[in-house]
Image: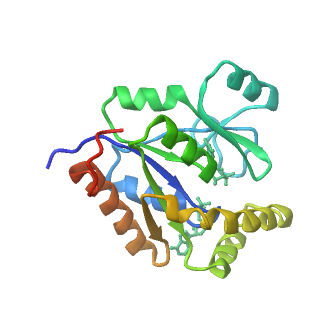
Amino acid sequence: MARIPRLFVISGPSGAGKGTLLSRVRESRPDLGLTVSATTRSPRPGDVDGVTYHFLDDSDFVARVERGEFLEWADVHGHKYGTLRSEVDRRIADGKSVILEIDVQGAFNVRKVYPDAVLIFIEPPSMEVLEARLRGRGTEDEASIELRLANARQEVALAEKYDARVVNDDLSQATDELAALIDSYETTGGNSNHGSY
Ligand code: ADP
Ligand code: 5GP
C-alpha cells in the first residue's frame, strides 16, 4: 500500500527506551528521517556533534531562538533543547516521514504548528524499571537521575493526550508495536482522516 509521509513525534521519560526503540525500528525503515536536535547540554560518551545532537553554547542557542530558527524549543532537565526548522523542512522536502524525539512540552508545541503530527508516547512498564534502566545506562550522575525520575512522573501524566502509547517492556514486542503503529499511520492514516504531516 502507498505510504503517506507523516510527521511523528516520540516522547517519553528519559530511560524509557526511546532511542533504543527508534534505532531498532530504523533498521527495517532506514527511510524514516530522525531529526538532529540542538542542545546546550554537554556531550556524553558516545555523543557525536552533528549526529546525536548539535551541541551549542547558551549564547548561540539564544541567538538562534531570536532568529526564529527553531520549530520548537524547551527547557528539559535544566538544559535547552530545540528542533531546528531546517532539519524538518529538509526531510519534508524529500517527501519522507520525519521523526522528532522530543519532550512533552515540545510535542504539544509541534502539534500547534502541525495539527496532523502523530504524537506517540513511549512508557516504561513501571517507575522501578525506569529507574533501573536509567541507572543501568550509566550515563547520568545521581542528581541527574533524581531530576529525570521527578520529571518522569509529570511526563507520564500527559501520556493520555498523545495519539498512541507503546509500553516498552519486552524490547522486541515494543519494537514491533512501534513499527506497526508508524506503518498504520502512513498507510491508513491510523484510523484518522488526517492528511500528511
Ligand atoms: P531513552 O532514549 O528513552 O532515554 P534509552 O533508549 O537510552 O532511553 O534506554 C535506556 C536504557 O534502557 C538503555 O541502557 C537501554 O539499553 C535500556 N533498554 C531500553 N529498552 C529496554 C527494554 N525493553 N528492556 C530492557 N532494557 C531496555
Ligand atoms: P537527553 O539529554 O537524554 O538526550 O534528552 C533529554 C530529553 O530531551 C528527552 O526527553 C528528549 O526527548 C528531549 N529532547 C531532545 N531533543 C529535543 C528537542 O529538540 N526539543 C525538545 N523539546 N526536547 C528534546
The quarter of the picture where residue 60 lies is top right
On the rendering, which quadrant does ligand 1 occupy? bottom right
Tally of marks: 0
In the rendered image, the vertical position of residue 132 relative to residue 196, given as above or below: below
Q: Residue at x 64, y 62 (%)?
A: 155
The quarter of the rendered structure image containing the C terminus is top left
Q: Is residue 118 left or right of residue 106?
A: left
Q: Is residue 183 left or right of residue 128?
A: left
Q: Residue at x 42, y 41 (%)?
A: 115
Q: Is residue 117 left or right of residue 57?
A: left
The quarter of the picture where residue 148 lies is bottom right
Counting from the top left corner in percent of width and height, residue 81 is at: 68, 41
Counting from the top left corner in percent of width and height, residue 135 is at: 72, 72
In the rendered image, the vertical position of residue 194 relative to residue 85, given as above or below: below
Q: Residue at x 76, y 27 (%)?
A: 62
- Of all residues shown, which one is farthest toward the right? 143
Q: Residue at x 55, y 78 (%)?
A: 125
Counting from the top left corner in percent of width and height, residue 178 is at: 38, 62
- Of all residues shown, which one is farthest toward the top? 67
Is residue 17 visible to the viewer in this orientation of the structure? yes
Counting from the top left corner in percent of width and height, residue 159 is at: 54, 64
Is residue 82 visible to the viewer in this orientation of the structure? no
Q: How is the image coloured?
A: rainbow
- Of all residues shown, which one is farthest toward the left? 1
